[in-house]
């Protein structure tokens, strides 16, 4: 922990954090808060990807669409090739 700051929380919140710290078996409240943030972040990501989360893979070069023809083609011809 390089820099620190003071956070004002209610006594009930401090007691709850202390209880969570003991359950997580971490050394201090900073670690407790960091773990809670990571868990929340993970939950948000899992909710966002839903059931497909294990099926999503990084894009590959083959996934890219070649749009160079748009740049090299006059606008009138491009608009003819676009869906209505």
Image: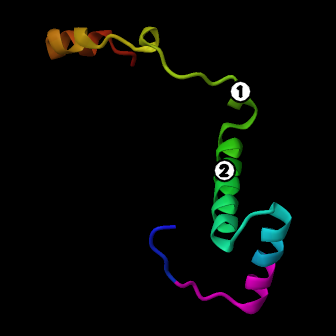
Residue to which mark 1 is pinned: 54
Q: Residue furthest bottom?
A: 11
Label 2 crowding class (10 Å Cα cut-off): few <14, some 14-19, many 20+?
Answer: few
User: Closer to the camera, 16 or 3?
Assistant: 3
Instruction: Write down the quadrant of residue 81 in the picture.
Output: top left
- Magenta stretch: residue 7 in it? yes
Residue 59 belongs to the span the image colors magenta: no
**Label ID, residue 7:** none
Element type at marker 1?
helix
Q: Which residues are magenta?
A: 6-16
Dot 1 or dot 2, earlier in sequence: 2
Instruction: Find the distance from the CA under tag 1 to the CA under tag 2.
Output: 15 Å
Which residue does the image show at 57% across and 84% down from the upper left? 7
Residue at 65% x, 54% y is 38
Where is residue 27 drawn, in percent x and y? 71, 67
Is 3 placed left or right of 80 in the picture? right
| Residue holding disc 2 | 44
Q: Element under label 2?
A: helix
Question: Residue 51's quadrant in the figure?
Answer: top right
Tags 1 and 2 in contact by the CB under 8 Å rule?
no
Q: Position of residue 50 (x, y in %)?
A: 72, 37
Along the horizontal axis of the image, is 80 left or right of 20? Answer: left
Answer few, some or many: residues within 10 Å of disc 1's Cα (few below 14, many 20 plus, some between 14 and 19): few
Residue shown at 20% from the left, 9% from the top:
77
Residue 8: x percent and y percent?
Answer: 60, 88
Query: Camera-side residue: 84 or 28?
Result: 28
């Amino acid at each position: 922990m390089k820099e620190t700051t003071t956070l004002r929380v209610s006594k009930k919140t401090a007691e709850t954090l202390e209880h969570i710290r003991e359950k997580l078996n971490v050394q201090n409240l900073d670690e407790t808060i960091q773990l809670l943030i990571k868990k929340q972040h993970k939950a948000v990501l899992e909710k966002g990807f839903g059931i497909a989360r294990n099926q999503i893979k990084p894009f590959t070069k083959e996934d890219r669409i070649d749009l160079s023809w748009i740049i090299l083609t006059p606008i009138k011809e491009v608009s003819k090739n676009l869906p209505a």
